[in-house]
Structures are given as C-alpha cells and as structure tokens.
Amino acid sequence: MDISYLLFLQNFRASIHDAWTPFFENLSQFAVTYLIFIPVFIYWCVNKRKGLFILGSYAVSVMVTSVLKLTACVYRPWIRDARILPAGDAITSATGYSFPSGHTTTATPIYGGMAVGFWDKKSTRWLSILCVFLILLTGFSRNYLGVHTPQDVAVGFLVGIAALVFVSWVFRYLEKNPQQEDKFLLGGFILCIVAITYIIYKPYPMDYIDGKLVVDPQKMMNDGFKDIAVLAAFCVGRFIEKRWVRFQATGLTVKGIVFGLIGLVPLYCILFLLKGLCIHWMGPHWGRAAFVSLAIIYILALYPWVLKYICPPKKTN
C-alpha cells in the first residue's frame, strides 16, 4: 500500500509536469537547513526558556531518529521498488536509511515547540496553527517527493512529538528540582557515548546487486555521528552556560535584534563553511560530529556570553 501511494503521487506529479515540485523541495530543504535559526534567535533575543525548550526537543528528536534509522536499516523506496522515481534532485539530498523521516523529526520539534510557545497569547495563536500546518506539510513533502513512505513520516511525527513531551516533562521536573539538572545533562551525554558505540559496532545489512553494495553502512553512519553529537553538545553547552555564562535574552529591542541577527552570521559559517574543513581534517564521521558540536556550543554558550556583555539586562531598582 505504501508503494502504491507513492506511485499515485508520482503519477500526479507527472500529470502537472512537476509544477509543485520546487515548492515541496524548498519547503523540505528549509526544515533541515535554515529552520534551526528561528529557535536560536528566540533563545538569544526573545525568551531563553522557550528557545532552550525547542532546541532541547530538537536535540533529543534527531538523536533518537539516528539510532532508529541505523537500527531498522530500512532502504529507500526506490531501492525497494524500481518504479519509484524521486522528484527533482531529492534522490541526491536524501541521505541515510529511510525509516523514520529525518526531515519530519527535525520539523516536528522545532515547529511544534514554536507552536507551544505561540499559544500562550491569543494574538499569536494563529502562528501556532501555522506551525502545525507546516509540520504536516513538511511531512507530506517527503511522500510527495518520493523519498519516504507514509510510515516513515508517521513515525517521524511520533518521534518529534515524543521528544516535545519528554523535554516538557524534564523542564517541569527541573523547575521543582533545579539541583538535578546536572544529572540529566550527564546522563544525556553518557547516553550519546553509548549510542555512538552502538552504531559503530552493530551489524548492518550487506546486500549486493550485480556485485555492487546496495547501501554502504559507513556512509549511512555519517548522519548518525552528526545527529547524536547534537544532543551530546547540547548537554555540554547547557552545562557551560548554566555554570559560567548565565545570560538573559536580550529582548526585542533594536540593539538586541541587531546583535541577535549578527550572531547568526558566524553560525551560518560554522554550519555551511566549516563543515567541509572538519570532514577533511577529521574524516566523514568525526568531522560531522565536530562541526555540529561547535555549532551547538556556540548557540548555547559562546554567543550568549558575548550577548551578556554587549546587551546586559536592565537593572531594576
């Protein structure tokens, strides 16, 4: 049934001459490239706690996704059925195994976290509805482009929602027991070490067609190292910020907005320019882990330290 559904969408794409394909490609790609900049800005300039909640949910979601992907080792739809022809350049941008959808497990905690935050005020509840719509649309885009089955997307939704619920519970618990936060951070970091060890040493399918390996597990582990490192770096970055930085969000002042936007420039360079250098110096696995770790620590602790002195909180009498 899942393949039949993808073939139906494929025939529809062909009937309208791929008119909607660029839109869904851009929507899908936005979720895993630029969407992260929004919660970063929220964390720096709008509301530190809400931003941290979104970023923490994202970190948990992508880490769990990578472990699930490299455990299930489900092949992409076009490998399972040669009739599936992914749209545009989706076949080159879709890396890793298929189950669950990584784009969906990225979009769900970020858009979902923003939806939760926007719901606080009646004036911004329309943004919550928009965010939920974008979650659903991003998930559908992965089916429309032919790179994921419906179950890939459905489980992606569930992973993202579970991450939001779990992190929400952790936040509520730590409000009552703030002295326990270091234990959670240490536990998360140790869990990441276990996860890295697991994906390195677990067995992988080694199927061949015409003497050629269908999927190289070493390449599939690239995203695993990167995504697990997101949670590990989140734990480290949060510990550094909590222990030594202790900044406050700048607020939506002109100065705060300007320096918040300026701070996104080095982050862009880390994410899109430093990545290649790290991979060149450290290899495809640890290079990806290194650049994303630097990005997360920059987000959580390094630039907040700068903001603390550039935009100090106003003193109250």
Image (spheres, grey):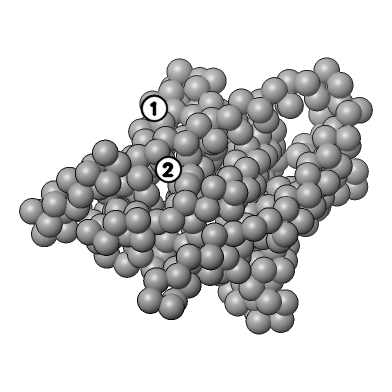
Q: Residue at 48% x, 39% y: name it.
A: 156
Decide if residue 5 is in sight here: yes
Q: Residue at 90% x, 47% y: name it.
A: 244
Q: Residue at 44% x, 76% y: name it.
A: 212
Q: Earlier in the sequence, mark 1 or mark 2?
A: 1
Callout 2 crowding tier (Cα within 10 Å): few <14, some 14–19, many ≥20: many
Q: Residue at 35% x, 40% y: name it.
A: 150
Q: Element under label 2?
A: helix
Tell me the quarter of the image containing the C terminus. top right
Q: Residue 55 at what x, y percent from top left?
A: 64, 42
Q: Mark 2: which amino acid?
A: Asp
Tell me the quarter of the image containing the N terminus. top left
Q: Is residue 1 left or right of residue 192?
A: left
Q: Is residue 170 left or right of residue 99?
A: right
Up-down: is 146 above or below 160?
Answer: below
Residue holding disc 2: 152
Residue holding disc 1: 129
Outermost bottom residue: 280
Q: Which quarter of the figure has residue 261? A: bottom right
Distance in Å between CA atoms under marks 1 and 2: 23 Å
Between label 1 and label 2, give the one nearer the viewer: 2
Q: Residue 146 at what x, y percent from top left?
A: 30, 53
Q: Residue 68 at what x, y percent from top left?
A: 58, 45
Q: Which quarter of the figure has residue 21? A: bottom left
Decide if residue 45 is in sight here: no
